[in-house]
Image (tube, coloured by chain):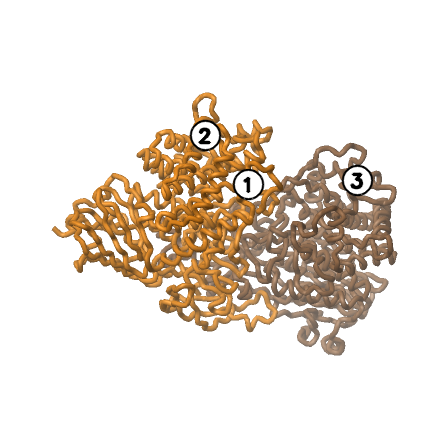
Chain colours: A orange, B brown
Amino acid sequence: MSSSTRNQSNPAPETLRYVPVDHSRVTFDGGFWKSWTQTVRDVTIPTQHKRLEEEGFLEVLDFDKPAGPLARPIQPSGLSMQHFFDSDFGKWIEAASYTLKAHPNPDIESKIDAIVEKLEHGQMADGYLNSWFIRREPGKRWTNLRDLHEMYSMGHLLEGAVAYFEATGKRRFLDVMIRAVDHIIDTFGREPGKLRGYDAHEEIELALVKLYRITRDPRHLALATYFVDERGQMPSYYDEEAIKRGERPEDYVYKTYAYSQAHMPVREQEQVVGHAVRAMYLFSAMADLAYENNDTSLKAACDKLFDNLTSRQLYVTGGLGPSASNEGFTREFDLPNETAYAETCAAVALGFWSHRMAQTDLDGKFTDKLETVLFNGALSGIARDGEHYFYENVLESHGQHRRWKWHYCPCCPTNIARFVTSLGQYFYSAKPGELAVHLYGANVAELPLGDRLLRLRQETNYPWDGDIRLQVSIDQPSRFILRLRIPAWCREASVSVNGEVIALDACTVKGYAALDREWRNDDEVRIALPMPVDRLYAHPAVSEDGGRVALQRGPVVYCVEETDIGCEPQRLRLPASTELAVRYDSALLGGAAVLEGTAFEAGTADWANALYRTSPPALKARPFRAIPYHLWANRDAGAMAIWLQEA
Amino acid sequence: MSSSTRNQSNPAPETLRYVPVDHSRVTFDGGFWKSWTQTVRDVTIPTQHKRLEEEGFLEVLDFDKPAGPLARPIQPSGLSMQHFFDSDFGKWIEAASYTLKAHPNPDIESKIDAIVEKLEHGQMADGYLNSWFIRREPGKRWTNLRDLHEMYSMGHLLEGAVAYFEATGKRRFLDVMIRAVDHIIDTFGREPGKLRGYDAHEEIELALVKLYRITRDPRHLALATYFVDERGQMPSYYDEEAIKRGERPEDYVYKTYAYSQAHMPVREQEQVVGHAVRAMYLFSAMADLAYENNDTSLKAACDKLFDNLTSRQLYVTGGLGPSASNEGFTREFDLPNETAYAETCAAVALGFWSHRMAQTDLDGKFTDKLETVLFNGALSGIARDGEHYFYENVLESHGQHRRWKWHYCPCCPTNIARFVTSLGQYFYSAKPGELAVHLYGANVAELPLGDRLLRLRQETNYPWDGDIRLQVSIDQPSRFILRLRIPAWCREASVSVNGEVIALDACTVKGYAALDREWRNDDEVRIALPMPVDRLYAHPAVSEDGGRVALQRGPVVYCVEETDIGCEPQRLRLPASTELAVRYDSALLGGAAVLEGTAFEAGTADWANALYRTSPPALKARPFRAIPYHLWANRDAGAMAIWLQEA
């Protein structure tokens, strides 16, 4: 029986959920991700600790000293952001921990231990742990969940503790945080005497699910479930809390609790609104709870929201949240390019959410977006040198956007770091009798197959070309379904197993080709994902992109930088007939495929002093090249554009 | 000798400067401006007083009462703007005064008198007059010229006092303000013991010139001259002042004194920077001082700045200052449409500046811009009903922009009001042996001609068509040069006198045709300014307008509103071949010429759930119409665009 026949009889993924592979089982021993993962491990992680130190973040843990002047950095408004510094070193610990299993590092470990010691020392007798409230506002804990990120910070510490425990087996940080969670359980809930609150900045919910997956303590899952279920119930907890503080609820600076996705119960939400990172963290938690609780109503809400996001509110880069004023969403189809906020954290968190969705419902529409953010809107947040960053990932610039060394709100650097250091987990998932390959890129992985391990090697230059060779190493023949993601951007994929071509139409369901067979050692799968240069057009309701075209090849979105072409790319006109050649440029920032061709430039020579005139600009031919968007702003300052005028 | 021959021999305007006609000598007894001036007089002026009352602005003048809670309205930041409320009723008095000579109104006059009485009562013994500092911060006067608009407010009171004196002959308000100016003269200047300061928000400079033109007191002109000359001298007065207040100069919220055009001496400034209204008020004062002092260095600075503004930083509507964050300028060619700030006040003030420039240097490049703001970027700031307003005059909207009844910073309503109620002065100027006609529109004017008056009637439907008939009424024949502005937008103007065609090429200098002849009673000048629909293109460096076209006819810029076409105008594609018909629509908001044709709409029907795809949108024909931009947002809410995709 051929594999394709077999697959026809069983086209749907099993209902049992997938489990992502442990990230440490995947080694990027070559190709695209090798240098990125090395850079983040060797440059990003150490320099971030240095910044946390020199910028005063870690001073907040000196619990025995009187709280001195407010630590830098401050917001432009002059307010300290010290009240959520815990989250920053929490996230740094998480990012660093992911590197330790495969690459033990006593120096990093001792730095983490030093932080843990201080946290344990500062923790209050009842388990409460938040450095801002303990040191700065000791009488005010749990009085303002709306504004002060109290549980958000604790959630990031918790994620750090889980990661550090998994990396090292050391329980100390984990135990500190379990005590903190116990305190939260004692404080919040529907039982009499408890506060019916939930943090306006979601985060602890998904951290609690991670904790539950270690402890299997049902109270941990129940607390996350409570927070998600309680969210947006009316009358609003934030109203009551404001009144208790002697404030008028209507004076809330963001005006609407939609800012925190707390304007209605989560299952009723159909449009993605408010602060983008908050939304993505909430939806990640909702996907986690749908998974853990078999909660189809949460899954259905996630599906609607994912559809809303991806069909009406997502940049072509996977960036999201167009507006700086609420760090989030505005109206549907509002996707301005130069003023795009598109925070790195939001793109990373869309990766979290997409990935989680795919574990319950193996659908390429989720992993396609994971891949989009990975190669574009998230990766653009970190410089090729591993120590400069973007917070906002604009799609167009006149040269005013440059990467920075540190930021007054440095949430993004540690977020992109933890994404990259745990990258392996996004590549593969398993469930009994099945392995799913979500992402492509050179690596070697040890994948669980029942009680045995299968070694899978990907050989490829992906994303610079679409030819992938999968080599199976297994100690004895074994029947299982290997599910291969066929990216939606690829219109002519082909797959062969040991030279035998697979009929993809027959075995592909929701973007995954199912190869159901008895696999043997040295079996070879070849996947060809042809990568012509695609000209992308935006939905006509996206008025900023009207008459414009974006270039994409494979999963990589391209941009044009002034430094490459000698004029602002905003002046280019790219007729539909323009031929675009692909060339691998090994000298470009570690190597990348670039696109080259001849476009037209709207000339300025004959404009004299006119700002407006009755004849259109004269066009003259100009060679140009486009580079992967994620590599922009790593060279000379200058203008950049993704969406180019078509004619 | 034919007039054209005569003109050839004397093509250049005389060096003597022009004097604008008194606005009350011009009566709009028909045509475009009749209903606007009536509406502003009968609706705008009374309702603005009502708003000032009901919003608590006038309560700041209750000097005998303890200062109560901070009056509304407040800024979004929560700060009161009460510290410059004086400017708002100062400007209202000015606007209202301009109506009084031709249309006496005891009710308005008594309302002004009531304000004047309170101001006089509150004025301090040494002449100081500013309600905020007298009532709220009595010890702090003259300690923060950088931030608190102290002289700006006094300047607007002074302009109000001058206008009220001219309208009624009553001296009380004028005397109050002369005492206030005396106090300023005692306080500021280069003499020992005086402060070498100047207000960061320019305004008093031009008010002092107005005062000087009444008093002919050289100290009044000298004070204005001092303020302009001192501006931007280093070390900065604002640095010294901040240090005196115990603040660090570098903590200045706007970071750079360019915000107030105080970063370098005014004669060295070549690029228009900072807060747009401040810049326009400063440049207006510079033009005034160039005029009064025969100061060629100030004139030269103005010329450079005017060129910079109009060739690199001006919206097609005459709006200016693209950015909300500094209410002003950013980089050159940065002219975003949907986020345009383009404050009404700034456009009005560009009118002030342009008009002043033309009095020293009769050049159509100045009056062309006066006309542009008049019919577009300034007039758009007031609704057709005369009681709703825009502060920001965007060039594109998705329907989120609606006119408001009042604003937390209501500087614009009284500014557009005073522009309209004094409109007559912008139409004509005179100097010995010459009359200049700057603007077209039905009116009848009594113009000074030596010691006699000439009556000039304009009959025209301008700006809806370009045929103008000027009829001269004069009691005896008189030789003088009549200079007629030939707008730059008009490429085929023709002029005849009593049926005799004038050779315009021969007699036109810098946009003005000079008709030098002996004029007799009943002489008739016919001016034909053909108005085809112009398709305008922006300089290629204006990236927002790349591939787009704007429609203009005569001086009127057009826009397309969703309410007229049933889809967002952002989706329209207007091929270069589209025929555009002109039709006068008497039912449209009092009547206007509209443009009609068939364009294409980028269709959304075949997009299903896609946000991006590899094929461009399908185009389908759609009839559309464009209306004058200044009339937008007077009907149903919806999207609007000036710059339309060309194809």
Residue B558 is left or right of residue B201, and the answer is: left
Residue A525 location in percent, x, y?
22, 56
Q: Amino acid at mark 3?
A: Pro
Residue B361 location in percent, x, y?
74, 67
* Dot 2 crowding, Cα within 10 Å, few <14, some 14–19, many 20+: many
What is the spatial separation of the Cα atoms under label 2 and label 1, in whole angstroms?
Answer: 22 Å
Q: Chain of mark 3?
A: B
- Residue to which mark 2 is pinned: A184
Residue B213 location in percent, x, y?
83, 57
- Residue to which mark 3 is pinned: B138
Tell me what residue is drawn at x 52 percent, y 62 percent.
B543
A66 or B622: which is nearer to us?
Answer: A66
- Of labels 2 and 1, earlier in sequence is 1
Q: Residue furthest top?
A: A192
Label 3 with label 2: CB-CB less than 8 Å: no
Marks 3 and 2 share the same chain: no
Under circle 2, the secondary element is helix
